[in-house]
Each structure stands twice: as C-alpha cells, then as structure tokens.
Image (tube, rainbow, N blue to C red):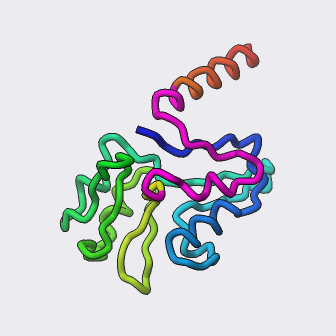
Amino acid sequence: MQLITVNLDRCVGCQNCERACAFAQAGDFNVKNSNIRVGVYPEERCCLPLTCFQCEDAPCMEICPAGAITRTRESNAVQINAQKCVGCKMCMLACPFGNIHFDAEKHVSQKCDLCGGDPQCIKFCVSRALEFVDVQDAYAFKRFSARSKLKGSV
C-alpha cells in the first residue's frame, strides 16, 4: 500500500497541491474543493500539507452507518462513496487526524482517495515536498529521521 508523505523542509506553502486536487476532484481550482489542506504556522515558519493517512484500521470506515467508506482494490485507498454517504459526519468525528471534510452543498463527507493511485497533488508540487511512497518505506524514513534528531540532541 502507498501513501502521501510530506517533507516539511521542502514545503513552501504555494498551495499548488490544493489546486491540483481541487481540479482533479471538482474540475475547478477552488482550494475549498481540495482534499489536501495546507496549514501555515507563522510562529515557526512551517507549512504543513495534510491529507488522509489511509489508516490500516480506518476508524472512519468502522463507524460509517451507511457503509459508504470502503477500501479500493486498485490502490488500497480508503474512499467515500458519495451516493451511499448520508451526511451524518460520524466519519469526521472518528478521524483522529481531522482529515475528512464535509461538502455542505453536496451534503456528503469527502477525503483524499489518492486519485485512484495517481495523486495529482504530487505531480504539481513544485518543491517536491510531497511523495507517494510505500507504507513500509515511509515508516523506515520516519524511524531514521527520529533517530537522527535524537542523536543530534544528545
């Protein structure tokens, strides 16, 4: 299984990822239609793109009363079927990362579905801060990164 990872040292907060996602999902460049959100934290001068972590044991999938949230066979991504979604927002409450959003006009929840295995946000990231990597590679990188930081602080 693959997921989107973020290199915070590279993100410049340009919002190209949001625009690419909005266009792929809704056919426009309105970042409100994006399933990836870029938060800017000026105190630390840090830009943080956030998207669904595609949890192995996805709490949103477990709690959905309509069975609208499933895992795709192609990319193994957790996705929301808009036709089945009843708009109860239980998945939003269950997501421990706050990465599910509600479209008030369509009355459905929405989240990153990895664009069917070809995430558009990554293609348009000018600083190459976003990567589409195997889950095991992502975990190995995080462990290496954490070890490096610990060694540097001792």
Q: Judge whether residue 129 is colored magenta.
A: yes
Q: Quadrant of the N terminus?
A: top left
- Residue drawn 23% across and 53% down? 62
Residue 94 is left or right of residue 116, and the answer is: left
Residue 44 in the image, given as x and y percentages of width and height: 78, 48
- Residue 77 in the image: state x and y as whole percent: 38, 50
Q: Nearer the viewer, residue 101 or 130?
A: 130
Asked whether 43 or 59 is in front, the reply is 59
- The quadrant in which residue 19 appears is bottom right
- Number of marks: 0
**For residue 25, above or below residue 106:** above
Residue drawn where x is 28% and y is 60% of the image: 69
Picture quarter with the C terminus: top right
What segment carries the magenta color? 115-139
In the image, 44: left or right of 3?
right
Q: Residue at the location (50% across, 71% down)?
A: 25
Task: Determine whether, in the image, residue 116 is placed left or right of residue 148.
Answer: left
Q: Position of residue 52 (x, y in %)?
A: 47, 53
Query: In the image, residue 125 lies at what x, y percent?
Result: 70, 54
Specify whether residue 122 is painted magenta: yes
* Left or right of 15 in this view: 120: left
Q: Residue at x 29, y 48 (%)?
A: 73
Vertical side of 17 occupied by 85: above or below:
below
Residue 138, placed above or below residue 127: above
